[in-house]
Image (cartoon, helix red, strand yellow):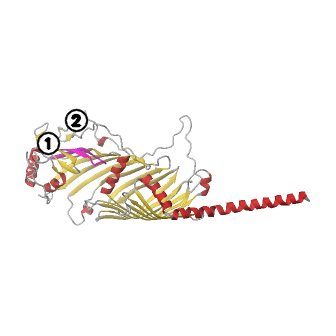
Amino acid sequence: MVVARVAFFQKKVFGLRLRTWLLFFVLTPFVLWGLLNLIFWTGWGTGFLEKRVEARVGLACEIESVSWAPWAGVNVGNVGIHPSGETSSESPLFEIDRLHLDPSWLSFTKGEIRWERLEVGAVKGRVSIEQLKEILAKYHENHPVKVISNPVKPVAPLEIKTEDGVVATPKKSKPSPDQEAVPPVVVPQRKQDSGKKSEAVPVDDFRGIIILEDMDLELYSEEHSEFSIRLDDVAGEIPIWGESREGELRVGEVALGSRLSEKSLNFPVTWGERALRLEKAGMKIFGVDLNVKGVIRLSAGLPAGLQIDLPDQQMDLSPIYMSQNSPVELAHLSSRNTLRGQLLNPRSFNGQSLTKFKGLVLHDPKDGGDVRFESGLAAFQLSASGIVAKDLRVIGEEDSILMNGFVTTGGQAAATVRIVSSPERASSHEKRIRNSSQALELSFLPLVTPDREYRDVRIEARSGTLMMDLGIDEQWVPLVPSVRAILGKSSQLKAPRLP
């Protein structure tokens, strides 16, 4: 009898414990769901997420609502990214109407953070070049880059006149960029043991996709209203994780200023070996043939690369000026441009650009004459510190222009421009600049031979304004008003005071 009662009691206790554990496992997700939604409903919860975003991107963040459910994923509504901490007094740089995330719960059990579906919808981004400059300056102020203590100021390369009358670099000088190839985009691969055969990258167990809808992005200038680059109605389906798959990125319209626009651009996207690749050859934008390659690898730092090539082609610049007469003609152009770095480390990005052209003609709007150049090139380097113009030159029978210089993200800039002309053209240049403004004068000096004269013009950023030594007795004058005066446009340029 006692044994039976003990057995009955144990069975009842065991059943009660079993029901308790079952209720615990069933109710716990609902309790957590309620608690987390309650936390995110308060300002403390959204504030916690805002601070995490601000720490990551370095910009102020504002989130209106967050909710989640185990069966419905995470929903974030009305996200604003602002240029500074005063979110209420400034228009946001980026507005995201909705974010939806379906996490892969199975991946969590394996120590991975994966999602099955990420949707980003109704994004509005509008950033000015001036704001971007301030953001980069603030970023580099908080993340200083080590620079050379005594930087060398740019000096125009020594040029001589060859027997055939073409200005060229002496043989002992460093090879010109037209003899150097800009390297293609290469994203680091996983290291392999030297003594073993390379193995294929293992396929991820999880499959995901990124859905982009209704994205409008614009980069513009506050000082120059005619400049803007706009991407409208960006959408796409981008595969991520799992086996090799294909997706697509679509742009409804890309516009450059108010004169040029191209509609309905499609870019194929491929996922494979833990990397996203974009590659499209033979596309045409604004009448220019382009080949585009891009890659993002899902490894530490998210290394990425972008390459845009313009194969050698004839150019027609008339669509840029529409009904107006084009002041520039260009017979042939080719260019290779690369950018590489880690998305999670903006300081790591560096790029190179090499452009060659032939048959450049400048139509003088003041006297209707033409300035012709047979060939030219432009070589630039981009780094975390700024942009360096390694070599920029246009070569002609009567005139040649050579330049090098730099612009830093901190606002410093300097350049040297060498003008080499025949004595007749040099005299014409001197007369024109003297007649354009009483504040300007230009005097040429003999080069190696008497049939060529030259003048070095130096440009620097002083107190936030670009200045050049083209004033009387080589005094410094503002660059933009001086150029406008030389071109015959209205200018408020005044003669500097002589000492």
Residue 401 within the magenta-colored segment of the rendering: yes
Q: Which element type, helix, strand or loop, lies under badge 2?
A: loop
Residue with the mark numbered 2: 170
* Residue lying farthest to the top in this orientation: 172
Viewer-proximal residue among 249 and 104: 104
Q: Quadrant of residue 165?
A: top left
Residue 148 in picture, x, y percent from top left: 31, 37
Query: What is the CA distance from the residue labelled 1 to the residue labelled 2?
Result: 17 Å
Q: Name the kind of residue labelled 1 in the image.
A: Tyr
Viewer can see residue 397: no
Q: Say whether marks 1 and 2 touch (CB < 8 Å).
A: no
Q: Quadrant of the C terminus?
A: top left
Residue 264 in picture, x, y percent from top left: 40, 65
Residue 291 in picture, x, y percent from top left: 38, 54
Q: Quadrant of the N terminus?
A: bottom right
Find the magenta span and give its range: 397-422
Viewer can see residue 3: yes
* Mark 1 or mark 2, whichever is nearer to me: 1
Viewer-proximal residue among 499 and 398: 499
Q: Quadrant of residue 223?
A: bottom left
* In the depicted structure, whether residue 235 falls above or below residue 281: below
Residue 251 within the magenta-colored segment of the rendering: no
Q: Is residue 103 left or right of residue 182?
A: right
Name the residue rendered at 43%, 52% in the picture. Answer: 294
| Mark carried by residue 144 | none
How crowded pointer 2 is (Cα within 10 Å; few <14, some 14-19, many 20+) is rated as some
Q: Which element type, helix, strand or loop, lies under badge 1?
A: strand
Residue 214 in picture, x, y percent from top left: 43, 66
| Mark carried by residue 454 | 1
Q: Name the kind of residue labelled 2 in the image.
A: Pro
How crowded pointer 1 is (Cα within 10 Å; few <14, some 14-19, many 20+) is rated as many
* Residue lying farthest to the front in this orientation: 2
